[in-house]
Amino acid sequence: MSRKRIPGAAGRVDEDGPGFRRAAAQPRLRPPTRGLDWLPAAIRDRSRVRELDEGEALFRQGDKAFAIFEVERGRLRMVRNTAAGRSVVLHTARTGELFAEAALFATTYHCDAVAAAPSRVRIYPKRELLAAFRTDPALGERFMAVLARQIISLRASLEERNIRSARERVLHHVALHAGADGRTMPVEGTLLDLAAEIGLTPEALYRTLADLEKEGVVLRTTSGIMLRKRATT
């Protein structure tokens, strides 16, 4: 079975440049909040589930915004279609993560949501959620905490996209998303997915990873990328 080509990367990136000092100074992101487990059981019981095949769209840019979503299994890729006809990957939501939260206060969805793998998504109608938040301010505060953490993550991603060196951008991404050991970033999906997520062409990512591995800076495994030592300029 052949792999599908994912939407291209946004922005031009230089493939040479300084090393890892800026990435080393970045704090690691907290693990994503695990869905809406803190919601009252009545709301969760009224939610529904949808199974998606790889490549199947949950919604399209411009569709009426009717709900927010939780990934129970798989990965959903948020893709924005530009006026120039390009597709840009904005974010990939993984198991336990929420997405499309802006739909609570929007009339339409501002991007496509497409399954990057066979996925299971729980659907929370926005009318019921908003009613619950108005009734119970504590629930609203919990949700605001979720959004605040996502803003932190978004700012880190924006900073990453401004790093022109492919080498430094890759190291920044691995350090920022490292797991409990502080050095190993789990990789779900293919390197094509990773390239789109960090805004590199697949060719630039392959070349950069090969150079870093040859230098002994990173070690690639079947499940992730590990920092072996700090890169130098």
Image (cartoon, helix red, strand yellow):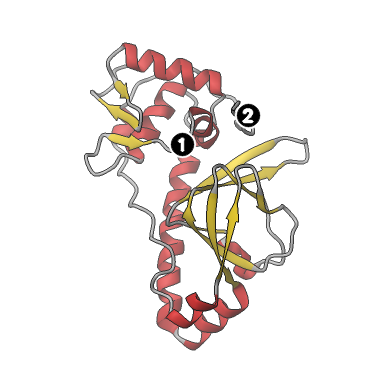
Q: Residue furthest front?
A: 1
Instruction: State which quadrant residue 210 falls in.
Output: top left
Between disc 1 and disc 2, whose residue precedes? 2
- Asked if 6 appears above or below 102 in the picture, the reply is above
Q: Is residue 72 left or right of residue 5?
A: left
In which quadrant of the rendered image does the C terminus lie? top left
Label 1 belongs to which residue?
160
x, y percentage for residue 78?
A: 60, 47
- The spot of residue 169 in percent (x, y) is 43, 29
Disc 2 marks which amino acid?
Arg
Residue 16, x across and y down, in percent: 45, 15
| Amino acid on which the number 1 mark rests in the picture | Glu
Q: Left or right of 20: which side holds 120?
A: right
Relative to 84, does residue 121 appear above or below in the rendering? below
Q: In this view, does 109 lie above or below 127?
A: above
**Total numbered circles:** 2
Cα separation, mark 1 vs mark 2, equals: 23 Å
| Residue 38 shown left or right of residue 122 in the figure | left
Q: Residues within 10 Å of mark 2 (few under 14, many from 20)?
A: few
> Between residues 164 and 101, which one lies in front from this camera angle?
101
| Residue denoted by label 2 | 5
Q: Which mark is residue 213?
A: none
Residue 28's x, y, as percent? 31, 44
